[in-house]
Image (spheres, rainbow, N blue to C red):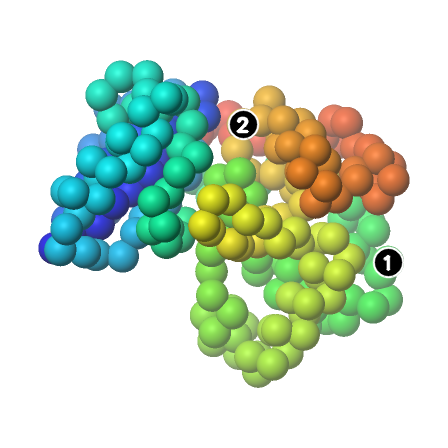
Amino acid sequence: MKLIYIVEDGRGNKKIGMTGDIKRRVTQLKTAIPNGIMSVMISDFMENAREIEKQLHEANKAYRLSGEWFSKVVNFCDIDFSYSTIDIARKSILTFQDSLITIAKDKELTGEMKSVLFFLMGNLEFENYITIKQVEIANQLEMQKTNVSRAMRLLVAKNIILKVKEGTTTGYKLNPTYGWKGKVENMEKAKEQMEKDKIIDFQSARGGLESPDVETYMDEIPY
């Protein structure tokens, strides 16, 4: 049995492929893709993976660049994909000093809630995706899962964590005005897209952060 993967490179192009060993395949792609891997989405293992892969290629043929590469994937053929937790590159994120001060001053964010937030920030995937499960957060922080869930609800209510949907995948992302994992040039694009999708109005909600206060980021990450 094999699974279907969708790899996004540093230019935003996507490769739809199939593998029986996603860790080995990502290792191969790290070497083969010159501008780096930004994210990896995977399906469950399935017996008819080759057929599904062909269906996905056909469904997105209008965006085909060459072979298995597409400028975008808009039709997921009702396949459920999740963002892989594979470590793609050095764990490092860009943060913003005024946002850290905002978090520190927020009296509604208790010690446990701030612990959850910092743990999420420490485990971000590229483009700010959050894939770690609440049960894992609870185990790692030695907290009750109900307290983790309460922290997540408050962080979402405060727009620090954003609930997003792409295709058939629903998940969470860190609001880019609080931090960013990925190429800096893509940060503004992400903010513009979220505002366009009416996920959040950055200008009114956060005063419109335009540039990072910290610039010691990603120097060693290969793209």
Answer left or right for 40 relative to 3.
right
Front label number (2 vs 1): 2
Q: Earlier in the sequence, mark 2 or mark 1?
A: 1
Choose top left, top right, bottom left or bottom right for residue 109. Answer: bottom right
In percent of the image, x 45 and y 21: which residue is there?
11
Q: Nearer the viewer, residue 157 or 145?
A: 157
Q: Amino acid at mark 1?
A: Lys
180 sits to left or right of 100: left
Residue at point 79%, 33% (across, down): 209
The residue type indicated by label 2 comes to: Lys
Which residue is label 2 attached to?
183
Which numbered marker is on residue 105? Answer: 1
Q: Secondary structure at mark 1?
A: helix
Tag 2 secondary structure: loop
Asked whether the viewer can see residue 40, the reply is no
Q: Are marks 2 and 1 in contact (CB under 8 Å)?
A: no
